[in-house]
Image (tube, helix red, strand yellow):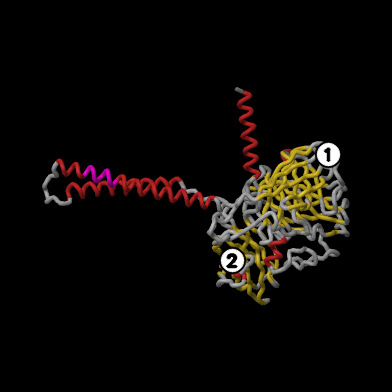
Amino acid sequence: MSKTLHAARTMFAFAALAMLAQAHVGSPDIYLDSKAGPYQLFITIRTPQVIPGVAELEIRSETPGIRQIRAVPLPMSGPGASFAPVPDQLTASPQDPQLFTGSLWMMAPGSWQVRITAEGAQGTGQIAIPVPSAALTTKKMPFGLGALLSVLGLFLVAGVVAMAGANAREAKLDPGVEPTAPQRRRARVAMAVSFLIVAGILWAGSSWWASEAAAYGHKVYTPMNMQAGLDSSGVLSLNLSDPGWLRPRPGHIALFTRSVDDLIPDHNHLMHLYAIRQPGLDVVYHLHPELVSSGVFRLSLPVMPAGDYKLYADIVHESGFPETLVSTIHIGPLNGRPLGSDDASGSFRPWPECSTTANTFTLPDNYKMVWLRPATLRARQPVLFRFRLETPSGAIPDDMALYLGMPGHAAFLKTDGTVFAHIHPTGSVSMAAFLLAQGQSSDMAGMDMPGMDHHANAVSSEVGFPYGFPTPGRYRLFIQMKHGQTVETGIFDADVR
């Protein structure tokens, strides 16, 4: 019996991990810190969980003098991207004139953009934010409302049956005349027939409702499958396949398409892969597999400690729709290659052994990464997470460099694996999608990103990442910055209320 229970627990654990691996682990809300013309804006877009649904906007201007902000949702491409409807004007907060809020309807799944126009003392500025629109769940009816509707429904059914019986029994009688036995029998027959008719109508309605719910269930976002395999020579293979999300039915026009062959480069790579050792989250690698055939990526692994690794792979489709794919792999003793110039790694003690209040992380070369930590961390609160790199003596490094075209990269991971977000100094959006929304090429070479005023020879030792933790709990942060030819990875822990 104990062996049976142990096997059942093991199977349940693996099933839970498999379900978790298919969960949508990206950032549900969108955070962006960038410029709309002369105005520096911190933009938060809380996307709806169901489609059609309402997206909530919160925009804080770091530049004074803005009089009004307008916003409109548009498809990322196609005819709809050129014919914008009348934009909605956001409402300025009475307590804070630099804070604007509003809401927008997202009517269909796919790759969208929200075009923001700011007007003020310095003229007009505009910026477009890519917004992946997808139903992430189905809304369940609250228990109290369901119980109330059930009682009211039973009352209506009883009323219809009673009226049918009264009509057959007493409708033609004079006042005060008692119905005869045949009339009572006709009444019972009428009530039985009316009950069957009402029951049939309810059954047909229930069947229609179940059919519609099942059809909508197929529209709930399902990430691409990623199957990981490792051969004896240390080559990792990642096989992508589409489970058929939003695949059109015969005779219907597809509102949105994706495939394993429509990927575009983001920071000059088709895939960014984070490999994080489980369960301690004590080892992290930022790697870049190469596409070798349709839907197949391969990578010769670097020297890595043995263990079980969770894999988080970021890709972007040509429509601008981003995805984070999840898989797992076990790595045994491995004679790997050295890290490539675009790769990075880091290690620390397992998260249960670490403090959630430490602000300084000492790196292997005795450089230090400092988190300018807020006093309190709360879920769904927009924050600019600021980090600084220092030399062993505490000075500012004079050889700061861009890492993959940015002053830094960050990964926010919840310790239970339900949240993973790869964040840039501009925010949570992929840079490839961001450039597409601005009408630019997704090629990072020679890019001109709004709000990014840095140059390769003038990179600051301090970097900020706009983000908000989606749910309370324990998180581990992996922060990457570069000086000279060295990519440093700082690791911090946070307890989010």
Q: Is residue 140 above or below residue 64?
A: above
Residue 240, given in percent of the width and then of the height, sits at: 69, 49
Q: Residue at x 71, y 65 (%)?
A: 435
Quarter of image, res 64: bottom right
Q: Is residue 181 above or below residue 114?
A: above
178 relative position to 432: left or right:
left
Where does the N terminus fall, quadrant-wise?
A: top right
Asked whether 364 or 309 is in front, the reply is 309
Residue 385, given in percent of the width and then of the height, sits at: 72, 55
Q: Identify the amino acid type marked 1.
A: Leu
User: Which residue corresponds to mark 2?
Assistant: 73
Asked whether 322 or 359 is in front, the reply is 322
Q: Identify the amino acid type marked 2.
A: Pro
User: Could you tell me which secondary element the residue under label 1 belongs to?
Assistant: loop
Please tell me whether residue 192 belongs to the stretch shown in magenta.
yes
Quarter of image, res 22: top right
Q: CA distance from mark 1 to mark 2?
A: 49 Å
Asked whether 444 or 472 is in front, the reply is 444
Q: Is residue 93 above or below residue 27?
A: below
Residue 133 visible to an observer of this rendering:
yes
Please tell me whether residue 253 belongs to the stretch shown in magenta.
no
Residue 195, given in percent of the width and then of the height, sits at: 30, 45
Residue 413, given in percent of the width and then of the height, sits at: 70, 47
456 relative position to 228: left or right:
right
The range drawn in magenta is 187-194
